[in-house]
Amino acid sequence: MAPEEGDTATATATARARATATATATVESVNGALKRARASLRRDQPAAAAREPAPVAGSPAEDELVARFVRAYESGDLDALAALLTDDVFMSMPPMPLEYEGRDVVTSFCALLFGAGRAYDLVPTRANGQPAFGLYVHTPSGIRHGTGLIVLGLAADRVRAMTRFENSVLPWFGLPRSLPRRWVTGGSGPAS
């Protein structure tokens, strides 16, 4: 073997060893960060057993809570909406990195939506067993355009989470991209 081949082999082996050491250190540092994050979450979040359970799917309690949410959202009634939220309500909008936590913060975000003069119709569906709604914004022409899907996480008689997805998911739930002018809200479909 020529000297330069040995030098190349040694250099390659050294580079591989360094890369392996770096990768190991990175994995260890990531694992450490995850452990610290989990500990922080356990400290900041009540234990699952301590949280109030959601009402049974399709029960009168769930139906009543969902109906109050729909009335508040469709009417843009921020006080009524805020009264339905838990103190630590969490709102996210994947895939966007927007997250809001706490009743006041989530209510302020909703105030921006309603304050812009937007009005919505909510069309019910379910996502992973949870109440969900197609969100349709009113337009001057009377047609309502789908703006997304909102999934609710419930706790007892309150909303503890709202996850809003982009409108591209509406067809996955059998919901149209827009509603014609004569659509009857509340999930009963087009007027006959």
Image: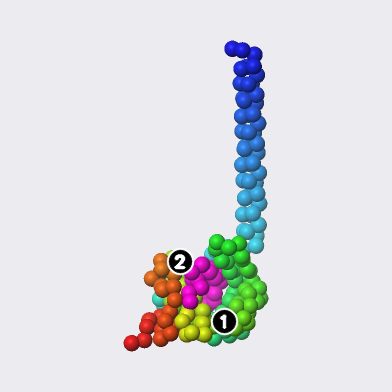
What residue is disc 1 on?
Answer: 118
For image coordinates 47% across by 80% down, the residue present is 144
Q: Is residue 187 highlighted in magenta?
A: no
C-beta proximity under 8 Å, tags 2 and 1: no
User: What amino acid is found at the position of numbered circle 2 in the picture?
Assistant: Val
In x, y percent, where is residue 154?
51, 72
Would you say the magenta stretch is mainly helix, strand or loop?
strand
In x, y percent, where is residue 32?
65, 46
Specify the quadrant of the image occupied by residue 183.
bottom left
Q: Is residue 150 highlighted in magenta?
A: yes
Specify the quadrant of the image occupied by residue 10.
top right
Query: Which span is picked out in magenta?
Result: 145-168
For image coordinates 60% across by 81% down, the residue present is 114
Packing grade of label 1 (10 A; few <14, some 14-19, many >=20) is some
- Placement of 187 over or under 43, stated as above or below: below
Residue 54 in sight: no
For image coordinates 43% across by 79% down, the residue present is 179
Left or right: where 181 falls relative to 37: left
Specify the quadrant of the image occupied by residue 180.
bottom left
User: What amino acid is found at the position of numbered circle 1 in the picture?
Assistant: Arg
Mark 2 and mark 1 lie on one chain; the one further toward the N terminus is 1
For image coordinates 61% across by 65% down, the residue present is 98
What residue is disc 2 on?
Answer: 169
- Placement of 148 over or under 82, stated as above or below: above
- Placement of 172 over or under 134, stated as above or below: above
Residue 143 in sight: yes
Packing grade of label 2 (10 A; few <14, some 14-19, many >=20) is some
Q: How many marks?
A: 2
In x, y percent, where is residue 74?
52, 83
Which residue of the protein is positioned furthest toward the left in this rendering? 192
